[in-house]
Amino acid sequence: MKLLGMAAAAVALLAVASPAAAAPPTDCPLRDAPFSIDSPLVDLLLSPAARAVVSGAAPGPLEKIPARFAGVEPPTFAAILTLKEASAFTGVKPEALPAIDAELRAIPVTDADRLARCARYDDDPVAFSVPKGKPAVLLFDKINGFRDGPSVDAARAAFEKLAAQKGWTLVATDKGGAIRPETLRQFDAVIWNNVSGDVLTLAQREALKSYVEGGGGFLAVHGSAGDPAYFWDWYADRLIGARFKGHPMGPQFQDARVVVEDRSHPIAAKLPPEWVMNDEWYSFRTNPRAAGAQVILTLDEASYKPEGMGQDLRMGDHPIAWTNCLGAGRTFYSAIGHRPEAYGDAQHLALLDAALDWTALDRKACAGKAG
């Protein structure tokens, strides 16, 4: 962490040094869950017994997994894949999965397995010195899944600059131990910066859920909703409100027309009716409208090629940024932001600037709209 020293509008990154790392927490999700084809792939790779079952399912299936998908140290793609999703490149046939699942479920979960599963989580307390009297936001970027360093760094720099211009306090951390009630209550909003993979213990999950539903603000960008598999339904289906399907790969980055759907919303007030920008465009398996979201931006699917990853990625109605109310809390998600250059785009910055104001300050926005 660093202190960003800028004149009167300084952004305070004021984290007090944490104590030496302790043993992994014991309340990590899936700690005691049976092995299965729906387990995080990394948990199968960490277990010699589970690896043996998978290896016996097809000629050299684990050797066929691209190296970047088969890492066991976070961040790793293996934390956001299951064997079911990975079967496409392992050579394991779909009809073989039920038998593999039965074999995996018969494997006893040992203490060594539990320790390995929890090792990617942390719960060391993180203390911050947050000045009183001005808005404060917590930028969180702990990543156990896919980490695209340039986009994470560019997003952090953009939010630091926006907070500095506002004269707000912004504190950044990649420690799950910061997600606890006594820490979160210091902040008006939490930013999920391209967070990928399951990163919170059960207690931390409950702390975030209580914080948002109790009136806190939550803002998330791009990769925070880009995992092929999720292991926390409330996060994917309620907090974000949509499940990732895929993005184009031929080419991956394309120009597309972004359309403002709801110009009456405060977040859209300073945006043009539409603009064209180049980015990696997400499609979703589910539509956030079904989760009660108020859509701010949509994509014109006729303006780019929504296909890739072996899929037709057309949604028809294609939301790309939206808000929602969960209890008294305000949530905002934008799928824009894989390319670092996106965080220099004037319209995108205006969107994020207004979204910060809405999530952190507009406490009446969700009054009487409990979701």
Image (cartoon, rainbow, N blue to C red):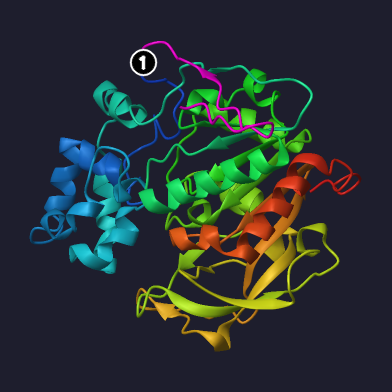
Residue drawn at point x = 83 percent, y = 44 percent: 362
Image coords of residue 179 (percent x, y): 57, 27
Residue drawn at point x = 48 percent, y = 54 percent: 223
Residue 346 location, quadrant? bottom right
Image coords of residue 184 (percent x, y): 65, 26
Residue drawn at point x = 26 percent, y = 63 percent: 87
What residue did someone put label 1 on?
21
Mark 1 lies on a secondary structure that is loop
Q: Amino acid at mark 1?
A: Ala
Give the extent of the magenta segment.
Answer: 1-23
Q: Tell me, yes or no, whether the highlighted magenta stretch contains residue 16.
A: yes
Q: Tell me, yes or no, whether the highlighted magenta stretch contains residue 273.
A: no
Residue 241 visible to the viewer:
no
Q: Main secondary structure of the magenta part?
A: loop
Query: Which residue is situated farthest in the left direction here?
Result: 59
Residue 296 visible to the viewer:
yes
Q: Is residue 291 above or below residue 233?
A: below
